[in-house]
Every structure is written in C-alpha cells, then in structure tokens.
Amino acid sequence: MKLMSFRDASGRAGWGIVEGSKVADLSATAPTLRAALAAGKPITAPASAPRLDLAGLTHLPPIPDPEKIICVGLNYLSHILEGGREPPKMPTIFTRWANTQVGHMQPMLRPKVSETFDYEGELAFVIGRHCRHVAEAHAMSVVAGYACYNDGSIREWQRHSTQFTPGKNFPATGAFGPYLVTPDEVGDITGSSLVTRLNGEEVQRATIDDLVFGVARLVAYCSTFTFLEPGDVIITGTTGGVGAYRKPPLWMKPGDTVEVEITGVGTLRNPIAEET
C-alpha cells in the first residue's frame, strides 16, 4: 500500500491511498496520515471514499507534521571512509525540523548565505505506534512504512562545530516522499538499492544492507532514549559519493534536478531553486 499526503487544487490538505492514477481521499476518516497511524486501526479505502486524480495533486511530505525527525549520520561505511573517519560504535544522532521539509516535485532551496548545498540520498522510515524500549528482534513491528529522503546539507554551516544541526535545518532543504510504502509491499528492505542522481547522472549507489546500523537496530536504540510516536520519522544516513568529497566539490545549484530512488519504495524528484 502506498500512502501520501497532498494539497488539492483548492489548497486543501489531505491524505489517502494511491490506487494507480487515482488517490482514495481518506481525509474524512482522520485529519492527517499521522493521526490515522495514531488511531491504531487498519488503513483501508472504502468504496465510498472520493477518488482524486493523482496528477492534479501537489505532493506534501508523507508525514507533514511529525513530532520528531531523527537523523542518523555516518551510517554507511563508504561515506565514513570518504570522510576519513572511523566507524562509530553507536549511532550518530541529530535532528531536523518539520518545517524544513518539502514533498516530491517541490523545489529544494539553496540558501542565500551559501553555495555549499549538498545532496544526501537516504532511506527514511516512519514509526507506526507509540513505543519505548523496543527489542531489536521485535523492532520491525513498529515500522509503518518506508520513503525516500534527500537530507540536503549546507556543508559550511554543518561544519561550524561538531554539531550538525545548523547545516541540516535551512528552510526547504530536506525532501521527503513521494509516498509512504508499507513494509508488506516492500518486503526485505535490506536488499533494496539506493541511488541518487543529479541531472540524470548517478552520484550515489548502495544497497541498504550496507548500513552500519540497520532499521531494527535504530528502532531499538532510539526507543531507548526517547518515546517513539506514530508518525515519527527516522532518516537512516547517506552513502558515499556526496558532493563535498568530490574533487572539485559538486554542489546542487538552481536549475538542477535531483532524484533519490530506492527499489520497491519509489523515486523522489526535486528541482533546485534559489532562496528569495
């Protein structure tokens, strides 16, 4: 099942199930997808639900209003090595704010104060229920689904200190989508490929099993230090090939198009524009 959040031609925000070229609008059953997950009931599309043309909808981030976005850095060995670091013994955690996100096909903005706008293709997953102290063996039971993510990074601001937060929270620098795909449709995510393309040229490639800390380990770790809530987003890190370590560096610039594709999950595509 593919779930999405959208804005229709009238400006109304909603959510629903993607059915080919249509979307079953389930906004009448819960105000948001996050609220639907929190209700704890199976999400289904009754015959009475309005069917909207997918082509006429604007993509919002699948979860536009998460309580938490937990980001994991330095989680693919190729990215760790290209930066000259040692593999971490524990996950490297930082945060991103919900108002920095955009949906599929929406512009990611290079900020006025910097040209060092880097791509980071990543796998994101969303928590489906309230939980704490989840054992790794049971962690997949709390995962509601997967999505693509581009954790756009303003490198010079990321490197102001050992804390990544400033470089990860400029407005409209994180892209999320296009859909939240349920685990039953994806199957074993560890065999999926993650590919990032900039203007059609492949710049990153990995398989999800190259993660140092996989999905189940991250659920167990994060649920130990905080309550995880329905709709919380965990972004699992990027692989090698980022622009910062290329010679010369390869930055995203206005007029570019960037894609993040994950097998079984979809392709997230965004144009790059200048902040005004």
Image: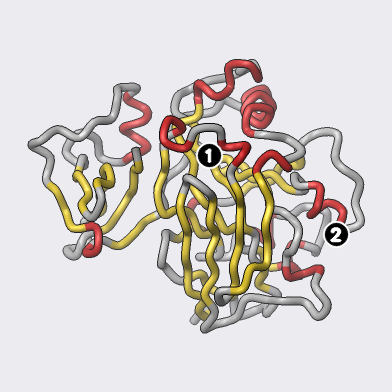
Ranked by sequence position, the earlier of labels 2 and 1 is: 2
Which residue corresponds to the image point at 54% horizontal and 51% vertical from the top-left?
262
Please provide percent x and percent y for residue 214: 68, 34
In the rendered image, the residue lying farthest to the left is 48
Mark drawn on residue 250: none
CA distance separating discs 2 and 1 = 25 Å
Which residue corresponds to the image point at 30% horizontal and 41% vertical from the top-left?
32
Compare residues 54 and 127 and report the one nearer the observer: 54
Please provide percent x and percent y for residue 164: 73, 55
Q: Quadrant of residue 252?
A: bottom right
Which residue corresponds to the image point at 87% horizontal and 42% vertical from the top-left?
87
In-image side of 194 versus 85 (left or right): left
Give neighbour class at mark 1: few <14, some 14-19, many 20+ (Cα, 10 Å).
many
Does the residue at mark 2 contact the one at mark 1 (Cβ under 8 Å)?
no
Secondary structure category for the residue under label 1:
strand
Please provide percent x and percent y for residue 52: 16, 53
Q: Is 194 drawn above or below residue 145 in the view shown? A: below
Kind of residue at badge 2: Glu
The colour scheme used to paint the residues is secondary structure
Mark drawn on residue 125: 1
In the rendered image, the residue lying farthest to the front is 191
Kind of residue at badge 1: Phe
Q: Quadrant of residue 37?
A: top left
Q: Where's the N terminus, which quadrant?
A: top left
Give neighbour class at mark 2: few <14, some 14-19, many 20+ (Cα, 10 Å).
some
Which residue corresponds to the image point at 27% horizontal and 42% vertical from the top-left?
17
In-image side of 90 versus 230 (left or right): right
**Disc 2 target residue:** 82
